[in-house]
Every structure is written in structure tokens, then in C-alpha cells.
């Protein structure tokens, strides 16, 4: 009897074990392919989140940390930067535009981003695509809010609804700005970026909302007042501090010069990063974990194949 016949009979006699071995090999191959697919999709998603921004400026911390909290809404800033620093950056002759960002509040688990109209003009994603409205309009009043597509879909929000924002970025907050509700003025089209899960408000609205919160806690009962169109904060007011600044330059050739000038700014410790370089640092940090997953998947495949061969030859 030939070896082939013996192998076939051996497989038939152990068909249950063989099926289990084949199943484990198939799962291992699927795991290997899934790891590669997830890696490529994650890189594509992160890369498409921000386009056309030359520098991101924030309080001095880590390069990756600044990228994560300012662009991807992951984590929190260790410190803020002053409005004067933003004005200093915006006034640089090499700077074409500068967009202030202020984070730190939330709405039912979604991050709140305070900014100005320039954000909707200059923020680009996925190879220079601009943000577009699906419904409504950009800020017409300081208590207007423009929400991302996922916020509108998951919470079933419509234009004209009032929403209450909360202090802090946790899923649950016991410190809410109930005395100053915002009204949904616009809903953005789907972008596939963190913008979809963001509630955008005006800097003037943020400043008014935090009146009396200097200590980080809500003002005492009786000190709050219902916001109206004639309160002490005008449409051009702004918070004393912000979280980060997106910067576009007149020429790419000035990138390193402006970055160095910001990093050496004497007014306060600042950090200016190039988004592409910071993103590459993130991938370098995750490279070891990705390699470990690949090795595990390959080892499982090899173990399954060796088990199959052992069964056939037994």
C-alpha cells in the first residue's frame, strides 16, 4: 500500500481531528489577514483626518500627545496656551491662517470643540476635502452649535434643537452648563474623521458658558444667569486660554523656521509639530505591537500545519 493511501486512511480515521486542525489553520490565516487589514485601514483613517495644515501648536508636551488630543480627540491636554500666544502666532508674516481650538467640554460622550468660522474654511481632510454642511448653517449666533454627522445620527438631533453641554470629557458629567444651552444651527456631512463625533461651538459661546467657572467648578447658586443676546459677552469675545492652534503657512519653505520660532517663544512654553512627522512617530510607536501580532498569527498557522502533517503521518 502506498504512502498516499496510508495517509488518506489515516485522515479518514481521524477526520474529526483533521477538521479541527483545518479550522484552526483557517482561523489563523484569517487572523493574519485581519491584522494587516486593520493596520492599513487605521493608517489610512489617521492619514485622511487632517490635510493642508502645516503646523499644530499647543502647550509643550509630547509630539504624539499633542497630535492625538488636538486632531483625534484622544486624551486631554496637559495645559492650555494663552490667547496672546495665539495672536502672536497669527501675526507672524509667514502665517497665512491660524485656527484656534479649545477643548475640555463634552455632550453625552461627544467632545465639544470651540473655534471660529475659519475652522470651516481651512480645515481639510482626505487630500484637501473641505467640510460641508448637510443641513443648516455655520455660526450665526454665539450660542449656535454645528454638530458632526455621527452626533446627529446617534442622538437623533435636528436643526433648531437646544443642547446642554457638560464640563469635562467623561461619558458622565455631574457639572453641566444648564444655564447656557446651545442651539443646533448646522449638521456637517459625513467625513469619516473625528469631526463626525464632535460638537462645534463658538469661542464667544465658550467664554460665556464658563463665566464664573474660574475655579473649575460651577458658580454658586444665584450667581448664574440665563444667557441671552444682550449679556456681557459680545460676539467677538474669546476665552483667555485655548488648547491648540492649527497653522497654515504662506510657503512650505518657512515651515522649519516658523516651527523653531514657536518652540523658542519666550512668552510661554509652546510646542509646534508637523502633523505628518508626528503621525509617523505614532506609527513607529505602534510598530512593535503590530509586529508581535504578525508573529503570533504566523506561529499559530505553523502550529496548525504541523499538527495537520502529524495527523496525516500518524
Image (tube, rainbow, N blue to C red):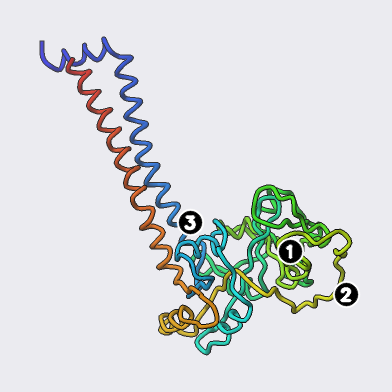
Which quadrant holds residue 26? top left
293, above or below 312, in the image: below
The local secondary structure at tag 3 comes to: helix
Of all residues, the one furthest to the left in this rendering is 1
Q: Residue furthest bottom?
A: 93
Percent x, y of residue 223: 86, 64
Q: Disc 2 or disc 1, which is closer to the eye?
A: 2
Q: Which residue is mark 1?
A: 145
- Real-space Cα separation, disc 2 to disc 3, in angstroms: 43 Å
Tell me if mark 3 has few (under 14), some (14-19) or many (20+) residues whose alpha carbon lies within 10 angstroms of its own. some
Please give the residue where the numbered disc 2 appears in the rendered image: 230
Q: Of label 2 and label 3, which has the lower sequence position?
A: 3
Give the side of residue 183 with respect to residue 170, left or right.
right
Real-space Cα distance between discs 1 and 3?
Answer: 25 Å
Tell me where residue 8 appears, x and y as whole percent. 21, 15
Mark 1 or mark 3: name the one nearer the start of the chain: 3
Distance from disc 2 to disc 1, alpha carbons, whole Å, reads: 19 Å
- Label 3, on which residue? 45
Nearest the viewer among 301 and 101 is 101
Horizontally, is 77 left or right of 187 in the view? left
**Residue at left offset 71%, top offset 66%:** 201
Residue drawn where x is 31% and y is 38% of the image: 296
Disc 1 crowd rating (10 Å Cα; few below 14, some 14-19, many 20+) is many
Amino acid at each position: 500500500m502506498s504512502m498516499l493511501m496510508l495517509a488518506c486512511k489515516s485522515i479518514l480515521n481521524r477526520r474529526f481531528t483533521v477538521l479541527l486542525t483545518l479550522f484552526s489553520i483557517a482561523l489563523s490565516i484569517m487572523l493574519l489577514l485581519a491584522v494587516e487589514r486593520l493596520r492599513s485601514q487605521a493608517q489610512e483613517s489617521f492619514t485622511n483626518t487632517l490635510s493642508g495644515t502645516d503646523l499644530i501648536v499647543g502647550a509643550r508636551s509630547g509630539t504624539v500627545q499633542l497630535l492625538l488630543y488636538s486632531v483625534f480627540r484622544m486624551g486631554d491636554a496637559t495645559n492650555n496656551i494663552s490667547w496672546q500666544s495665539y495672536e502672536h502666532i497669527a501675526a507672524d508674516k509667514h502665517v497665512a491662517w491660524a485656527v484656534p481650538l479649545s477643548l475640555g467640554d463634552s455632550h453625552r460622550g461627544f467632545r465639544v470643540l470651540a473655534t471660529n468660522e475659519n475652522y470651516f474654511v481651512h480645515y481639510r481632510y482626505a487630500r484637501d476635502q473641505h467640510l460641508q454642511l448637510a443641513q443648516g448653517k455655520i455660526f450665526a449666533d454665539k450660542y449656535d452649535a454645528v454638530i458632526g454627522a455621527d452626533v446627529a445620527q446617534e442622538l437623533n438631533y435636528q436643526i433648531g434643537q437646544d443642547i446642554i453641554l457638560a464640563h469635562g470629557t467623561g461619558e458622565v458629567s455631574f457639572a453641566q452648563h444648564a444655564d447656557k444651552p446651545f442651539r443646533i444651527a448646522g449638521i456637517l456631512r459625513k467625513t469619516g474623521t473625528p469631526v463626525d463625533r464632535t460638537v462645534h461651538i463658538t469661542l464667544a459661546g465658550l467664554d460665556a458658558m464658563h463665566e464664573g467657572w474660574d475655579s473649575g467648578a460651577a458658580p454658586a447658586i444665584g450667581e448664574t444667569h440665563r444667557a441671552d443676546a444682550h449679556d456681557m459677552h459680545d460676539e467677538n469675545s474669546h476665552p483667555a486660554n485655548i488648547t491648540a492652534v492649527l497653522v497654515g503657512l504662506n510657503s512650505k519653505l518657512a515651515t522649519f523656521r516658523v516651527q523653531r520660532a514657536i518652540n523658542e517663544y519666550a512668552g510661554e512654553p509652546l510646542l509646534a509639530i508637523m502633523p505628518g512627522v508626528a503621525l509617523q512617530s505614532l506609527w513607529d510607536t505602534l510598530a512593535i505591537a503590530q509586529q508581535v501580532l504578525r508573529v503570533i498569527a504566523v506561529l499559530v498557522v505553523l502550529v496548525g500545519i504541523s499538527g495537520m502533517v502529524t495527523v496525516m503521518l500518524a
